[in-house]
């Protein structure tokens, strides 16, 4: 991932409401050698990248009451020559997002919304 590069998140959140976010790839990521994961963080953005699978999450954290998250997982994955990545999205406060995961956990419940695209510019 190229530090300083601008990424946009567009799509629909878990409630089928329009979402949009902007992230600048932060500098100085930390690395967890056990899980082979990179963490890029600033007050306005987070990116989590898993080395083994090339799966990643992009978070626009500028507004804590409406975090915008796009999660890119298999069969899609990060590739340095690619500019757009489809994923699943969530938006809301951290409590809202935790509630979505709690509801989904082991319940068999499915989301009806939550499609996003991350675009590198």
Image: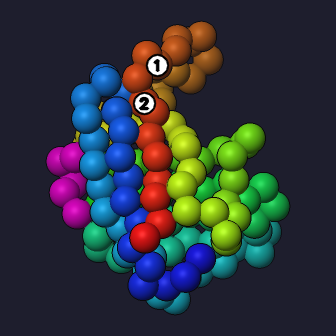
Q: Residues within 10 Å of mark 2 (few under 14, many from 20)?
A: many
Cβ atoms at labels 1 and 2 below 8 Å apart: yes
In this rendering, the answer to whether 81 lies above or below 111 is: below
Q: Nearer the viewer, residue 46 or 114?
A: 114
Residue 49 visible within the image: yes
User: Residue 76 location, x and y as percent?
Assistant: 69, 46
Part of the protein shown in magenta: 62-67
Residue 60 visible in rendering? no
Residue drawn at 38 percent across, 52 percent down: 9
Where residue 67 appears, as percent x and y from the top left, is 29, 50
Q: Nearer the viewer, residue 66 or 19?
A: 19
- Which quarter of the figure is the C terminus placed in? bottom left
The alpha-carbon separation of the residues under discs 1 and 2 comes to 7 Å
The residue at the point 50 percent across, 74 percent down is 40
> In the figure, residue 26 lies in which quadrant?
bottom left
Which residue is labeled 1 in the image?
111
Front residue (pair 34, 45): 45
**Residue 28: percent from left, percent from top:** 52, 89
The count of marks equals: 2
Residue at figure coordinates x 27%, y 41% from the top left: 19
Question: According to the image, label 2 marks what residue?
Answer: 114
Q: Quadrant of the N terminus?
A: bottom right
């Amino acid at each position: 991932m190229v530090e300083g590069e601008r990424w946009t998140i567009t799509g629909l959140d878990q409630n089928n409401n329009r979402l949009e976010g902007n992230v600048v790839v932060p500098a100085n990521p930390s690395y967890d050698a056990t899980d082979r994961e990179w963490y890029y963080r600033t007050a306005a953005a987070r990116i989590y990248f898993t080395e083994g699978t090339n799966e990643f999450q992009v978070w626009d954290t500028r507004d804590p009451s409406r975090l915008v998250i796009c999660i890119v997982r298999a069969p899609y994955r990060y590739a340095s020559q690619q500019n757009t990545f489809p994923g699943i999205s969530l938006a809301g406060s951290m409590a809202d997002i935790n509630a979505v995961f709690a509801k989904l956990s082991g319940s068999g419940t499915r989301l009806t919304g939550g499609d996003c695209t991350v675009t590198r510019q």
